[in-house]
Image (tube, rainbow, N blue to C red):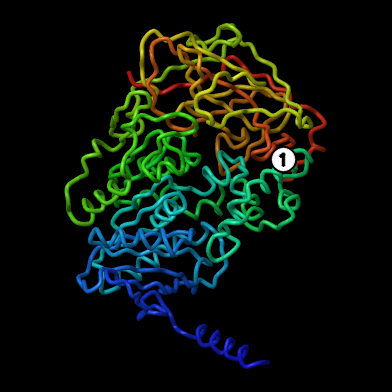
Amino acid sequence: MNNYKKIFILLFIILAMIDVDAQKTLSPNFRSQDEVYDIQDSIMIRTRDGALLSAIAVRKKGDTRPKPVILQFTIYVRDKDRDLQSLKDAVDRDYIGVIAYTRGKRYSPNEIYPYETDGNDTYDIIDWISKQSWCNGSVGMYGGSYNGFTQWAATKKVHPALKTIVPYVANRPGMGLPMENNIFINPNYEWSFYVGNNKYLDTETGNNRNRFRAMMFKWWESGAAYKKMDSIDGTPNRLFQRWISHPDFDDYWQKMAPYKEDFAQIKIPVLAFDGYYNDSQNSSLYYLRELNKYSPDTPAYLVIGPYGHFGTQIGGEEMINGYKIDPLARFNIKEYTYQWFDFILKGGKKPDFLKDKINYQVIGTDQWRSAPSLDAMHNTYLKFYLSKNKLGKFYSLSSHQPKNLEYFKQEVDFSDRKSSNNDYYPDPIVRDNIDGNGLVFVTEPFEEPFLINGSFLGQINLICNKKDLDIGLTLYEVTAEGKYFHLSYYIGRASYAKDPAKRTLLTPGKKESIPFSNTHLISKQLQKGSRLAIVLNVNKNPFSQLNYGTGKEVSEETILDAREPLNIQWFNSSFVEIPILK
């Protein structure tokens, strides 16, 4: 054994023997040479179960006063630029800035398992922060996407020092991603490599969209089982396999963040930001709805507008999926965030932009409105049934309950790879037509303007010859000019419609009722002469799991299970309810 190898092994043994707990750091004396900021960039925090987490803390040089701490906890390691700048921003506003990274990231020696330990780890990080001489006992958290999730994970058991959270487009594992209404969606496949391949971010793999697009279509065309996706890719995907082994919203997902009664003990104020076209909006609003259900007195605020997942985190972009948003919709999210921190952590005034608990931009009006709750965004529903009467080339959405029970027939051949179903994704937001293989239902033109405000819901009544199917519904405004404006959509697995934690298979040949409600929230001004359209279809495309309806685990089904086409009778007693504000 050469001397270099001996020295390396000796150093490794010494480091492993150092007793680092939640009150100590491995490198407490490291300081950068920055003239303005005092930077500790090699902090290691030991969790209660023995893991080591890497962190950075930034203070103003020469200022020893204890202050509130602004914490970010993330799986995205960008420590050389964006992360460090965000910490300096906190210091410039008279706070202490701390960013910590999830297990396995940066200098952490542990394995990388997104979501699974972040709740307990956040508690230990906050505990360590609260015991530092430079902390005054108050910690606030902020950040978007995964960083939004870790904030809610921190409320699974709230540390006394945590005084507020400001989540942007927060993820809720199992409830929006990597599956939406129990359907696994493909984009999370490549994300697992992006965050899981190394201590930082595998941008080379993550940016190789051609590789994953080719893999996705190869899987689609081959008819292989969904669980064979990584075999087709040629690279084992351990996180993907771990996730798809939990198709129920079971204990694996439930323990990652607050669930049911967990929300009752959350009393700290919350400020959330989200977008109508955020792919994971279901995740983010899930937290707020459950918080309001179990702890209605907790002060929870929402700012939401016509933004996507990335756009929300920068306060909006000029264009979203080809649509130019109203000028007033954009805002300075960093400024709003620190106004909130000053309010909660320093006793400042309540921010002016918070007119009420729910603050939303109305598409098409260049104005903001507010409401005391999500339910109070609307004051009535428009209820429409799927009528067999025709309105031009489409069927009718009728406000009258049908007198006679009738049905629409649809056949879906899962062995056919030349056609796909359910063009639900809102890109572009405004389109010239919605012709496809789904059933389209439209209303008569409306005689007065009104606001669609909230999340649409309803019930689909059907008979089919299979034990399961994945349903898609898309809601459009049909403008007086004949354009189709994408408002909202739903995709969901019928066997989980009544309980995402328990699969209940359909009985072939028996009439079934499939309720749905977990749709995307929208606020949009509809003008006189506009109509509403619903597109009803079966989810069959290369961008998510393919449910063949055998009743087996969907990830194990193959094209061999497609010998008999899916035959459906959609009944005209099916209905949708559209939340409106008059």
Is residue 250 toward the left or the right of residue 37 in the image? right
Q: Position of residue 320 (x, y in %)?
A: 46, 34
Query: Split into 4 quadrants, where in the image is the N terminus?
Result: bottom right
**Vertical arrangement, residue 366 with respect to residue 112, above or below:** above
- Which kind of residue does numbered mark 1 sit on? Phe
- The front one of 513 and 159 is 159
Q: Position of residue 254 (x, y in %)?
A: 51, 51
**Vertical arrangement, residue 86 with respect to residue 517, above or below:** below
Is residue 349 toward the left or the right of residue 116 in the image? left
Report crowding for label 1: few under 14, some 14 to 19, many 20 or more residues within 10 A (C-alpha): some
Is residue 512 toward the left or the right of residue 107 in the image? right
| Residue that appears at 60% across and 45% down | 187
Is residue 222 toward the left or the right of residue 80 in the image? right
For residue 183, which quarter of the picture? top right
- The front one of 46 and 353 is 353
In the picture of the structure, the residue carrying the numbered disc 1 is 217
Query: Split into 4 quadrants, where in the image is the C terminus?
Result: top left
**Vertical arrangement, residue 259 with respect to residue 542, above or below:** below
| Residue that appears at 17% across and 51% down | 348
| Residue that appears at 78% across and 30% down | 416
| Count of marks, rendered view | 1
- The front one of 265 and 487 is 487
Mark 1 lies on a secondary structure that is helix
| Residue that appears at 27% across and 62% down | 91
Q: Position of residue 384 (x, y in %)?
A: 49, 15
Q: Position of residue 227 (x, y in %)?
A: 71, 49
